[in-house]
Structures are given as structure tokens and as C-alpha cells.
């Protein structure tokens, strides 16, 4: 089959996890097919074989591609010819089931889209980095907030020097949903997020703190130099952190504050970021994602809105509706899947993907995020004021 022939069809993808009772699994499926050029054709949708099969039946998967385990899915899909086998796998399991299937599919030559945080340890992260490089696969990580059009516009402002030299970053992500001990009330999403065996060494930091770290890195390209972290667990008996305050120092002199909380009474999903430079500042709020504020030195605040021609090329590529028609959470995931899909199509066509197509979080972002989690824990346990990020 020639390269030209190979792209005259829709991409096929499969999913691991994301079956019945999964919120995020449905988000990923909807995002993956939003470009109109991708189809959901295979799945191993639960670690429970019966639930996996039932979930696939709910979604009308063909019986022969409705798998009872990811191992069965890998073996069968590997035997299918190009154009019939899945072009990539989307892995949306709880954190403790990320590493093994991800590594196995990469080593079998499959492209992967993985939910964040990538894995539990830096050793696992390095194994994935090595495997991606060795097998030359496309790897995307769904830090979805990088998919918002006005986050891309904010990045463009920083890259173009509009803010001048960056001096201060403030990023926060307050939620209230774990204010009570929901993990003891049968709520699946709370159970695994607060369980060290499934969530790893961190709770709120892994769940939402990694989004903050990734958002800062994506918009500013600043590199962490050191941190001073204070991890807290406010709900009695909870085993992992539900609140964290972190001072940040970046290479080049900029400084930052990162606060995350899942016990912040009255908060819903309050991710927001403020970036201050010598020539201006910006602010963006996830709960009002279609607007980006700019504060020039000596001038009035300016409000930029999504869907307008004055935005940069990356922001316009990430926009799907005219101005005034809100776009948000689903579309942000869709933009990551769009760029991953177009990068896979470029590979199939034998050409280099464009910078716009390559605009998605990678295995290297995931590895940095895992290191961030480890360093936060190290800093919080240390009596030393600053912990180096090296």
C-alpha cells in the first residue's frame, strides 16, 4: 500500500479503559472523533473482563474487536494488516494502569495517546521516553488545557516578546469536590485518586497540580530551577495530599507561586494563570476560557476573545466555532487529538509534520511532570528551604 493510498481513509483508534461509569473515557472518545476523520473501532474498556465486554457492547463495537483485556487487544490488533489495525491507542485507565499497556503498545509499534499524569515514577517515565525514541511512534499526552485557543494565544504573546522579560507567574487550581471523604462513600473517581496504590505518591498534585505545571511550561517555556513545597492533607484519615502551596524559582530569575486544592470550599474548577513581564501582563481563567486579558504597562486592560481574526495562527487552528459561540472542555481535548491525528497522517504520507500539527504535549512533557511530582514530595518532606529541580 502506497503512502498516498494509506491516507485516503479515516484513522482507526482503540481505547483501553473508559468503560461504564467513566467520565473521562467518553470525553476522549468524543474528542478523538471530533475531526470527522477518525473512527473508534476497538476497545478493552475495563480491567474487569465482563465489564469490558459489556461496555463495548454499549458502544456497539464489533464483537471481534470488543476485547476482554488490553493484552488480548494488543495481540489481535498486531496481527491485523495496515489500514485495518488501529492507528493509535487511547489509554484512559487509572494512573496505576498507565505504564504496562503503554510500554507494550509502543514496543509493538503503535502510536499512543495517554491521559495524564503519565506514570508513577521517573524510572517508568524514562522507560517510555526510551521506547518512544527507539520505536519512532507518535506519543501524545492529554494535558487538555494546552488545547484552548486563548492559551495558545497567550503562548504566542510570550514567544513574541509582548510581555517583555518574564518576572512572575501565579497559577492556581482550586476545587472543592474532595472536601468530604467521598472515597468512603463508593465514588469511584474519589477512590482511586486518594489511594496511594493507584494514584501514586501524590493526590491533588498528580490530579490537578501537574496541569498547573504543564500550563506554565507550555505558555512561558520557563524551566524550573528550584521549589519550596508545602503539602497538606486536611481531610482526616485521607492518605494523600488534598492541598498544596509551592514557591517556584525559574532559570533566568523569574519566580512563581503554584497553589492547588481539592478542599477549597465553594470552588468548582478554578484553574487560572497570571503572567507578569516588564512590558505587560496576561491572565486567563479556565472557567471563562473564551477570553484572555492583556495589561500593557501604562495602558488600559485589553480583552481578547476567541474566534477573531486578530488571534495568532495556532489559536485560529484551535477554533471551531464563530466568536460568541463558546468553546471549552471537549474542544480542548479535541484539539490535542486533532494535532496527534494530523501528525500520524503526516507520518503515513511520508512527510514531516508542521509546527502547528506538532502542537501537543509529548512524552517529554510527561516525564517532566512526573519529576515535578517527585520533587514536590521531596521538598515537602525536607527541612531545607529550597529543593533543586535537577
Image (cartoon, rainbow, N blue to C red):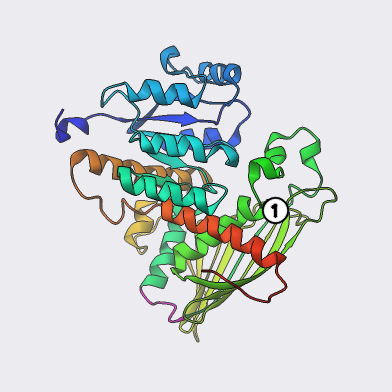
Query: Per the image, is 163 magenta?
Result: yes
* In-front residue for pair 199/135: 135
Q: What element does badge 1 sit on?
A: loop
Query: Per the image, is 25 magenta?
Result: no
* Residue 176, percent from left and from top: 74, 51
* In-front residue for pair 338/92: 92
What secondary structure prevails in the magenta region?
loop
Quadrant in which residue 46 is drawn:
top right
Identify the residue at image location x=69%, y=45%: 196
Residue 271, relative to residue 102: is it above or below?
below
* Residue 327, percent from left and from top: 48, 48
Q: Is residue 322 at least partly visible in the picture?
A: no
Residue 340, relative to residue 313: is it above or below?
above
Magenta part of the chain: 160-165
Identify the residue at image location x=70%, y=53%: 175
* In-front residue for pair 240/88: 240
Identify the residue at image location x=18%, y=46%: 351
Quadrant in which residue 109 is drawn:
top left
* Residue 1, percent from left and from top: 16, 27
Residue 106, relative to residue 373: is it above or below?
above
Q: Residue furthest top?
A: 63
Identify the residue at image location x=84%, y=48%: 237
Dot 1 corresponds to which residue?
175
- Side of 77 relative to 9 (left or right): right
Q: Is residue 206 at least partly visible in the picture?
A: yes
Amino acid at each position: 500500500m502506497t503512502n498516498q493510498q494509506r491516507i485516503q481513509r479515516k484513522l482507526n483508534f482503540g481505547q483501553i479503559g473508559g468503560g461504564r461509569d467513566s467520565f473521562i473515557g467518553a470525553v476522549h472518545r468524543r474528542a478523538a472523533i471530533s475531526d470527522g476523520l477518525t473512527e473508534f473501532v476497538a476497545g478493552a474498556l475495563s480491567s474487569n473482563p465482563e465489564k469490558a465486554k459489556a461496555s463495548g457492547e454499549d458502544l456497539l463495537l464489533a464483537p471481534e474487536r470488543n476485547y476482554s483485556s488490553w493484552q488480548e487487544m494488543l495481540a489481535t490488533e498486531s496481527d491485523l494488516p495496515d489500514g485495518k489495525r488501529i492507528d493509535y491507542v487511547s489509554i484512559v485507565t487509572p494512573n496505576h494502569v498507565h505504564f504496562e499497556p503503554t510500554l507494550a503498545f509502543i514496543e509493538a509499534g503503535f502510536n499512543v495517546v495517554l491521559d495524564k499524569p503519565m506514570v508513577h515514577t521517573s524510572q517508568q517515565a524514562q522507560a517510555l521516553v526510551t521506547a518512544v525514541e527507539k520505536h519512532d511512534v507518535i506519543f501524545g499526552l492529554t494535558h487538555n488545557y494546552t488545547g484552548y485557543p486563548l492559551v495558545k494565544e497567550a503562548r504566542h504573546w510570550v514567544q513574541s516578546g509582548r510581555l517583555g522579560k518574564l518576572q512572575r507567574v501565579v497559577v492556581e487550581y482550586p476545587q472543592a469536590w474532595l472536601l468530604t471523604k467521598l472515597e468512603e462513600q463508593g465514588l469511584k473517581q474519589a477512590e482511586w485518586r486518594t489511594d496511594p496504590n493507584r494514584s501514586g505518591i501524590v493526590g491533588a498534585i498528580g490530579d490537578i497540580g501537574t496541569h498547573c505545571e504543564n500550563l506554565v511550561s507550555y505558555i512561558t517555556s520557563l524551566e524550573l530551577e528550584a521549589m519550596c513545597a508545602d503539602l497538606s492533607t486536611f481531610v482526616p484519615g485521607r492518605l494523600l495530599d488534598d492541598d498544596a502551596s509551592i514557591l517556584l524559582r525559574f532559570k533566568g530569575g523569574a519566580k512563581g507561586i503554584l497553589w492547588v486544592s481539592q478542599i477549597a470550599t465553594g470552588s468548582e474548577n478554578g484553574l487560572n494563570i497570571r503572567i507578569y513581564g516588564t512590558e505587560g501582563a496576561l491572565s486567563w481563567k479556565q472557567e471563562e476560557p473564551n477570553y484572555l486579558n492583556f495589561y500593557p504597562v501604562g495602558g488600559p486592560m485589553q480583552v481578547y476573545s476567541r474566534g477573531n481574526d486578530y488571534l495568532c495562527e495556532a489559536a485560529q487552528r484551535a477554533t471551531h466555532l464563530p466568536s460568541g459561540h463558546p468553546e471549552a472542555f471537549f474542544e480542548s481535548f479535541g484539539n490535542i487529538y486533532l494535532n496527534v491525528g494530523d501528525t500520524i497522517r503526516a507520518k503515513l504520507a511520508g512527510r514531516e509534520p508542521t509546527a502547528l500539527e506538532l502542537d501537543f504535549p509529548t512524552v517529554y512533557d510527561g516525564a517532566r511532570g512526573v519529576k515535578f511530582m517527585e520533587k514536590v514530595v521531596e521538598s515537602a518532606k525536607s527541612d531545607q528551604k529550597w529543593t533543586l529541580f535537577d
